[in-house]
Image (tube, helix red, strand yellow):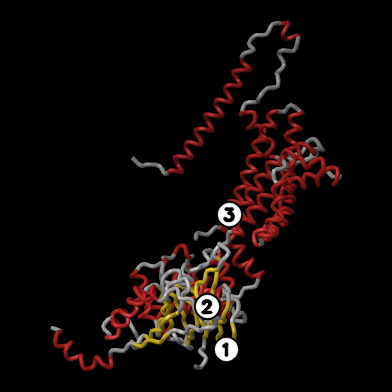
């Protein structure tokens, strides 16, 4: 197997369980992400998604295992790996624009002030923020607008890998929809590699090239890698019409509803590597013959 | 009928209370002096006719205030200086001691806030030294420093250090993990993180500590100057008491209040500047 752009090798995370023993969140998790790919990871709470995210961000260290990006092991946080946190993590004493220039100035220290500002304004504009709003403090912005600023800050830094930790978890459903499409718009113009945690199946299908499914913790593992065989550009209203949509959705619901629990808690043999099984669901090849039938039913 | 705004109604009440208070004060004192009535020849001979020292009515205090404030900076020898000069000395001592304290308390507070080892190591000393009345240091300061002026500044230093130290430590330790993570993911160095993330995040708590400190320093300087003497508003109060000039005593008490309020509101403004809403 060729080395991926980002490869996670035998990642294991254990915590002391407070009784002298150890509590294994996940063990020997291994997977790869290609350059320019948008990958979502789905799983129940407590399966260690956020832990994987923090390890990728360099904010915490795994018990064992390595993360390699572009062939080099990563350690510690870096500007090459941008993070969008669930709670926005904007600095409340800075305006929206200053929050973005803060990141850009750190990323490109030799840029002139004007260039930093123009670059930041351009990215705020891409997520639909312009005019007066960019000079407001986060407290004067709605939750959706705050998360837009946070996304603009991350994209403006043009990191090699962008990590999104449940970025829309705190937003209402309608706002979430709009920002998801804005995220797609910003992303499609770049070859940005994105790794995103989510709880929302529909969101994952809309955004991702591939969805990684995790079993329940403890001893969680990345069990499956489901390809999203729906062509881009996608919109929320169009993808539900695609024949693959419900097939993929059902597979994901079945996994999260039943199999994530059934597969959970199996300790691995020493030195084993748990790579996810690749699942490809594509109805379009067989559905071609079914189509006239479906049309006949339509009024 | 038009309803007045809350502020206007409050202002009317304040003014009314002021006038009622001054009226009661004025009349209770004039009534006292009027009671003497006709004096017998004997009483006149024994000196009962001369005015006794008593609490002056507000009208006299106002006249005194007008005299003093129209020429605040005169200097007619060590026992007769204008109120402006006396207050100037006090403010100079307070600010000197205060800024020396800030220069030590804020960096040390940062250290304590960032490192739990430093916190645990220094906490016993802080807990023992903090409750000591600042004036209790005075004899030791006078003996070691051998200079009354510097001793007063030292007392201000020692009393204003604690609130700033503890609030800085508390503010720095309480900076949200997310904001520190933002600094980490942007590869900011320790110094840059301290100035661009931790300082603005902790600034409201730090400035609150500074505001408490300046209040305490202004309380303590009056007592300290009563002890060391020479100059300053505290000395002035005590000196006028020795002169039995109660009008001046009351006037200077009011001035202490006014200056304290101005110092406090200056820090109030600073507090508003650094405040942020999460």
Secondary structure beneath disc 1?
loop
Residue B1: image quadrant is top left
Tell me the subunit letter for badge 2. A
Residue A298: image quadrant is bottom left
Within 10 Å of disc 3 (Cα), the crowding (few <14, some 14-19, many 20+) is: some
Answer left or right for B269 relative to B54.
left
- Residue B174 to residue B41: above or below: below
Badge 1 and badge 3 in a common chain: no
Residue, x 40% and y 76% (percent of image)? A263
> Between marks 2 and 1, how big is the CA–CA gap?
18 Å
In the rendered image, which residue does mark 3 sit on?
Answer: B271
- Residue B201 to residue B90: above or below: below
- Residue B14 to residue A219: above or below: above
In the rendered image, which residue does mark 1 sit on?
Answer: A71
Can you give x and y, in whole percent of width and height, for residue B40 in the image? Answer: 69, 6
Can you give x and y, in whole percent of width and height, for residue B7 in the image? Answer: 46, 43
In front: mark 1 or mark 3? 1
In the rendered image, which residue does mark 2 sit on?
Answer: A82
Tell me the subunit letter for badge 1. A
């Amino acid at each position: 197997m060729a080395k991926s752009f980002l490869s996670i090798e035998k990642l294991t995370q254990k915590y002391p369980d407070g009784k002298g023993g150890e509590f294994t969140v996940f063990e020997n998790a291994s997977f790869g992400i290609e350059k320019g790919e948008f990958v979502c990871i789905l799983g129940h709470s407590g399966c260690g998604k956020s832990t994987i995210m923090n390890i990728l961000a360099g904010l915490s260290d795994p018990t064992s295992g390595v993360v390699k990006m572009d062939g080099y092991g990563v350690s510690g946080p870096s500007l090459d790996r941008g993070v969008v946190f669930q709670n926005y993590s904007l600095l409340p004493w800075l305006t929206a624009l200053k929050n973005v220039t803060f990141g850009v100035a750190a990323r490109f220290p030799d840029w002139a002030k004007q260039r930093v500002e123009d670059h930041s304004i351009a990215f705020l504009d891409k997520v639909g923020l312009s005019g007066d709003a960019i000079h407001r403090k986060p407290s004067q912005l709605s939750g959706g607008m705050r998360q837009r600023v946070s996304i603009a800050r991350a994209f403006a830094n043009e990191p090699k890998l962008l990590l999104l930790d449940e970025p829309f978890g705190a937003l209402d459903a309608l706002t979430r929809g709009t920002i998801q499409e804005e995220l797609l718009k910003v992303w499609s113009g770049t070859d940005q590699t994105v790794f995103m945690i989510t709880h929302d199946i529909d969101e994952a299908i809309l955004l991702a090239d591939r969805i990684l499914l995790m079993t329940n913790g403890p001893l969680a593992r990345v069990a499956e890698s489901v390809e999203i065989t729906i062509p881009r550009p996608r919109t929320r209203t169009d993808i539900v019409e695609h024949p693959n949509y419900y097939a993929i959705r059902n597979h994901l619901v079945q996994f999260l509803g039943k199999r994530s629990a059934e597969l959970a808690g199996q300790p691995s043999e020493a030195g084993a590597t748990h790579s996810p099984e690749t699942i490809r669901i594509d109805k379009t090849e067989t559905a071609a013959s079914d189509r006239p039938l479906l049309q006949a039913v339509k009024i | 009928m038009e309803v007045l705004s809350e502020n206007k109604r409050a202002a009317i009440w304040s003014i009314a209370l002021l006038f009622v208070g001054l009226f009661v004060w004025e009349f209770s004192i004039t009534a006292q002096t009027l009671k003497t009535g006709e004096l017998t020849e004997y009483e006149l001979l024994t000196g009962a006719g001369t005015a006794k020292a008593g609490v002056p009515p507000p009208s006299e205090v106002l006249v005194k205030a007008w005299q003093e404030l129209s020429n605040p900076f005169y200097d007619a020898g060590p026992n007769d200086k204008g109120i402006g000069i006396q207050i100037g000395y006090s403010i100079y001592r307070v600010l000197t001691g205060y800024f020396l304290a800030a220069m030590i308390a804020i960096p040390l507070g940062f250290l304590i806030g960032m490192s739990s080892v430093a916190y645990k190591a220094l906490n016993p000393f802080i807990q023992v030294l903090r409750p000591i009345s600042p004036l209790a240091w005075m004899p030791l300061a006078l003996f070691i420093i051998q200079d009354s002026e510097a001793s007063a500044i030292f007392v201000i230093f020692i009393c204003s250090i604690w609130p700033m130290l503890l609030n800085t430590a508390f503010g720095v330790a309480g900076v949200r993990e997310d904001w520190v993570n933002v600094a980490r993911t942007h590869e900011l160095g320790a110094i840059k993180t301290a100035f661009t993330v931790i300082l603005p995040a902790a600034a409201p708590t730090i400035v609150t500590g500074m505001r408490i400190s300046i209040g305490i320093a202004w309380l303590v300087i009056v007592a300290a100057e009563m002890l060391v003497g020479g100059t300053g508003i505290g000395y002035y109060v005590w000196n006028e008491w020795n002169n039995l000039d109660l009008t001046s005593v009351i006037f200077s008490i009011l001035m202490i209040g006014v200056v304290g309020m101005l110092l406090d509101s200056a820090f109030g403004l600073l507090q508003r500047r650094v405040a942020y809403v999460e």
